[in-house]
Image: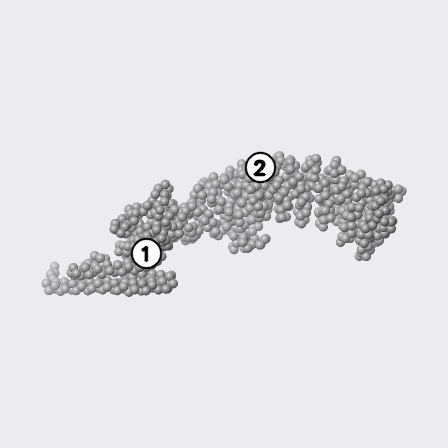
């Protein structure tokens, strides 16, 4: 073993002392540098603080200086090591004073900033963030400084009438995590800091500071006074107490910052921080989720973090559940605002939102609200019939339909589904209708509404209905014909006597009377409602539904009018048993005035069908119905003309036991019935023949045989009718002449020909009943036709003109005419002879003179 020389030993000691003194000198130098640096920084901060620089720029520059000072502070040796620097008592005391002066300068800088603007408390939050970046920074001296600044702020804000400290939520989040730190001294300081912070928050919110009862208990906070240091034990390692106190004290906006900051900590690489943040976050939302704002932003952030798989999945989904508990509408709206179809992450979020049974009704209400919109359309700017590409339009209804497939089967939603069955059923049928109209249709058809409809049936005890529909291959064809789909669903539900019928009927009625709706919605309601009524009501219908039907018949939308008229055909047996059936009939007659030809045709068909079912004794409206047919006999649409004429004849035949009620109406429609015998449309001409046969038979006129094809001649028919008019209804001749006069202006050649002939025979048979002024009018009208482009009309007009000239010549005066009018009425009866020798295109014989009836007339 080697032994050292005493001289060598002494030299080593001298060297050690020299190194130690050099090291100490370096540390002393670092303290002096920190001291001078802080003084310099303090002067710069105070200079900026008193300047007129923009507040944001001012804060940013001050924050950089503070961060620089923070760096100087954290590299300083501890107080114990500082004491070791001194070689004597005086040196130690000087070193301690220097150490404390440095800390005091930093405290003064912070207090100066905070005293002018509480917003700058955010610097404390930044300090905690800087500390968290490096575990070596987590020093008691920094926490002490933060607590001193907070205590200073508490004393200051108690003097204010109003306090604005917007950074308290973020600062509280940082302190709350330190309350669970592994270092007891850090926990102690963080708990004390939380106590100070909540005191400031209480001053900020006067209502909370009054210690109002919460859940039957009173909560009060005890804070450190200037003389007594008090540490609230409840903040230490107790995350539940922290969450309760913070949620109770912070304003909603600040609590939202608190929650948001903790949410961001969930993705921290430090498992301890992430776990503590998760616990505090869940406790906070358990107790105070209703105070959290910016729910949509939080939900969206959770979705994106879940998609990135860089967070605590179970905690995130639990947050969704807790937020849904207090803000179901905000959560659901955000969850519906993602691409369709939903990915696995979104479906998991739906399931998390659906696990809260207490808000199931609110969730379904929100989804129903979303489903009121039409997918594939931009509601604010969309013009009628115009669709935009799916990727730039509203897809939330499609997402909502798909979401129902997740929500409806959940056990927590069983009661809510039963409660909202009518709304869900009806709204999903609306969506089926909308989805079938999407332009352009995606390659994968949007069948979410159909899927949700199936799920609804199976969750509502209607599995057999779904099975029946599936066996009939209904679901595969659902979007092809949505109107038929609605009918078939209603029919199948009725066949199984579904127990939800009463509430479904009430809801459909409620929808019907609420006011204007989309035509697609009204179509669905009409089909579904009328099918249910037709299947469940075997006796008379309630009066309320008759009012609905009349309103729909006269709807401004022709699609709605036509549909209800069509559906009434199938309800004829039920309507026949209804007391106030006249209201329906009158509404249908009003539909005759529609500008839409398809509505008029459907109204004619529906009325005829109902009249076939109605008891003939109820024909109190017979006269009104007959009169309503008359204007349609001259309709521009040949189909409407022919149907109106045909139905007029059927009405007369049906009411043959009440002919006296319809005689006036028959004579009112006589002119168009005669003139349209010459119609170019064979349907109209044939209808006129058939109807005239019925009418003349009811009037006891022997004209029917002339209307047979083998005997038909227009002029002979006119001659026969006019001869019968002279005998039995001469008082109507003047009115018939007036009716015929209007057709002389027609642009249709066959009408002008026929009217010239008819007016001539009417004048010949009843000219003695006309006044001179009336004859002069007739002469002027006929005179116009003497230059007509059609030679036949010109020739016929000459004959008619001559007839009126002769009548005018016979009249000696208007006074004499009026004196003898009554006498001639009873005694002047002379049958007419053929005047025109007219051979119409529709005639079946060569010449009127070949007719057997002409020979008979000559014989007379």
Q: Nearer the viewer, residue 311 or 184?
A: 184
Residue appearing at x 38%, y 52% in the figure: 254
Query: Quick check: 88 left or right of 589?
Result: left
**Which circle's residue, 2 or 1, is located before the other in the chain?**
1
Q: Secondary structure at mark 1?
A: helix
- Looking at the rendering, in which quadrant would you find the C terminus? top right
Asked where in the image residue 73 lies, by quadrant, the reply is bottom left
Residue under numbered circle 1: 124
Q: Residue 390, position in %: x, y?
A: 53, 54
Quadrant in the picture for the N terminus:
bottom left
**Residue that extends furthest to the front in the rendered view of this protein:** 815
The spot of residue 107 in percent (x, y) is 28, 58
Q: Is 277 placed above or below 21 here?
A: above
Residue at far left of view: 6
Measured Cα–Cα span from mark 2 to mark 1: 72 Å
What residue is pinned by disc 2? 495
How packed mark 1 is, by other alpha carbons closer than 10 Å (few <14, some 14-19, many 20 or more), is many
The structure residue drawn at horizontal position 85% and vertical position 49%, both measured from the top left corner, is 813
Nearer to me, 553 or 524: 553
Indicate the position of residue 283 as horizontal and vertical percent values: 36, 46
Does 156 sit left or right of 808 as displayed? Answer: left
* Disc 2 versus disc 1: nearer the observer: 1
Q: Could you tell me how many numbered marks the image carries?
A: 2
């Amino acid at each position: 073993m080697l032994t050292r020389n005493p001289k060598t030993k002494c030299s080593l000691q001298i060297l050690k002392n020299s190194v130690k003194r050099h090291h100490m000198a370096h540390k002393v130098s670092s303290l002096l540098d920190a001291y001078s640096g802080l003084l310099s920084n303090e002067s710069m901060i105070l200079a900026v603080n008193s300047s007129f620089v923009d507040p944001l720029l001012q804060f940013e520059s001050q924050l950089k200086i503070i961060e620089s000072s923070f760096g100087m502070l954290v590299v300083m040796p501890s107080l114990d090591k500082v004491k070791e620097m001194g070689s004597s008592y005086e040196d130690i005391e000087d070193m301690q004073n220097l150490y404390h002066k440095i800390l005091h300068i930093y405290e003064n800088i912070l207090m100066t900033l905070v005293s002018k603007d509480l917003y700058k408390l955010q610097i404390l939050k930044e300090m905690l963030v800087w500390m968290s970046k490096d575990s070596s920074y987590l020093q008691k001296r920094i926490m002490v400084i933060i607590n001193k600044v907070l205590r200073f702020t508490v004393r200051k804000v108690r003097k204010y009438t109003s306090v604005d400290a917007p950074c308290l939520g973020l600062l509280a989040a940082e302190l709350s995590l330190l309350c669970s730190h592994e270092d007891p001294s850090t926990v102690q300081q963080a708990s004390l800091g939380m106590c100070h912070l909540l005191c400031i928050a209480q001053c900020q919110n006067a209502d909370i500071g009054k210690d109002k009862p919460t859940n039957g208990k009173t909560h009060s906070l005890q804070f450190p006074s200037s003389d007594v240091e008090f540490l609230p034990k409840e903040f230490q390692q107790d995350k539940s107490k922290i969450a309760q106190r913070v949620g109770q004290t912070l304003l909603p906006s600040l609590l939202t910052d608190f929650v948001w900051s903790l949410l961001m900590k969930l993705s921290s690489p430090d498992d301890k921080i992430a776990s503590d943040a998760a616990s505090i976050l869940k406790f906070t939302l358990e107790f105070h989720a209703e105070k959290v704002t910016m729910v949509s932003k939080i939900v969206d952030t959770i979705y994106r973090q879940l998609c990135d798989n860089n967070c605590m999945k179970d905690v995130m989904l639990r947050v969704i559940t807790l937020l849904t508990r207090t803000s179901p509408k905000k959560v659901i709206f955000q969850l519906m605002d993602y691409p369709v179809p939903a990915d696995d992450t979104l479906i998991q979020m739906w399931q998390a939102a659906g696990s809260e049974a207490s808000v199931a009704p609110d969730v379904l209400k929100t989804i129903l609200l979303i489903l009121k919109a039409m997918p594939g359309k931009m509601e604010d700017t969309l013009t009628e019939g115009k669709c935009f590409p799916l990727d730039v339009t509203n897809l939330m209804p499609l997402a909502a339909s798909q979401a129902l497939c997740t929500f409806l089967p959940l056990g927590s939603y069983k009661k809510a589904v039963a409660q909202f069955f009518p709304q869900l059923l009806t709204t999903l049928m609306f969506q089926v209708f909308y989805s079938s109209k999407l332009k352009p249709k995606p390659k994968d058809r949007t069948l979410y509404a159909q899927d949700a409809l199936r799920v609804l049936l199976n969750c509502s005890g209607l599995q057999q209905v779904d099975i029946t529909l599936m066996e009939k291959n209904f679901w595969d064809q659902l979007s092809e014909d949505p109107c038929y789909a609605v009918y078939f669903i209603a029919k199948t539900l009725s066949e199984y006597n579904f127990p939800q019928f009463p509430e479904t009927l009430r809801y459909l009625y409620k929808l019907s009377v609420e006011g204007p709706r989309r035509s697609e919605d009204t179509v669905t309601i009409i089909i579904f409602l009328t099918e249910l009524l037709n299947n469940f009501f075997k006796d008379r219908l309630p009066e309320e539904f008759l009012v609905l039907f009349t309103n729909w018949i006269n709807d401004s939308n022709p699609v709605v009018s036509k549909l209800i008229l069509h559906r009434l055909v199938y309800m004829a047996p039920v309507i026949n048993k209804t007391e106030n059936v006249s209201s329906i009939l009158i509404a249908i007659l009003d539909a005759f005035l529609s500008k839409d030809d398809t509505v008029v045709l459907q109204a004619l068909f529906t009325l005829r069908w109902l009249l076939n079912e109605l008891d003939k004794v109820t024909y109190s409206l017979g006269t009104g119905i007959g009169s309503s047919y008359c204007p349609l006999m001259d309709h521009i649409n040949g189909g409407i003309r022919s149907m109106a004429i045909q139905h007029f004849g059927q009405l007369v035949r049906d009411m043959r036991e009440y002919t006296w009620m319809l005689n006036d109406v028959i004579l009112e429609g006589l002119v168009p019935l005669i003139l349209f015998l010459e119609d170019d449309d064979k349907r109209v001409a044939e209808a006129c023949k058939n109807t005239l046969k019925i009418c003349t038979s009811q009037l006891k006129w022997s004209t029917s045989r002339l209307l047979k094809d083998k005997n038909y001649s227009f002029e002979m028919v006119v001659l026969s009718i006019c001869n019968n008019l002279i005998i039995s209804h001469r008082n109507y001749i003047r009115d018939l002449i007036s009716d015929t006069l209007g057709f002389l202006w027609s642009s249709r050649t066959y009408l002008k020909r026929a009217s010239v002939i008819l007016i001539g025979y009417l004048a010949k048979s009843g000219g003695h009943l006309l006044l001179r002024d009336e004859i002069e009018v007739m002469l002027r009208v006929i005179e116009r036709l003497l230059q007509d482009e059609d030679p036949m009309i010109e020739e016929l007009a000459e004959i008619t003109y001559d007839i009126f000239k002769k009548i005018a010549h016979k009249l000696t005066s208007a006074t004499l005419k009026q004196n003898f009018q009554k006498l001639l009425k009873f005694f002047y009866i002379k049958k007419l002879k053929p005047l025109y020798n007219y051979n119409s295109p529709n005639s079946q014989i060569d010449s009127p003179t070949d007719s057997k009836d002409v020979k008979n007339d000559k014989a007379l």
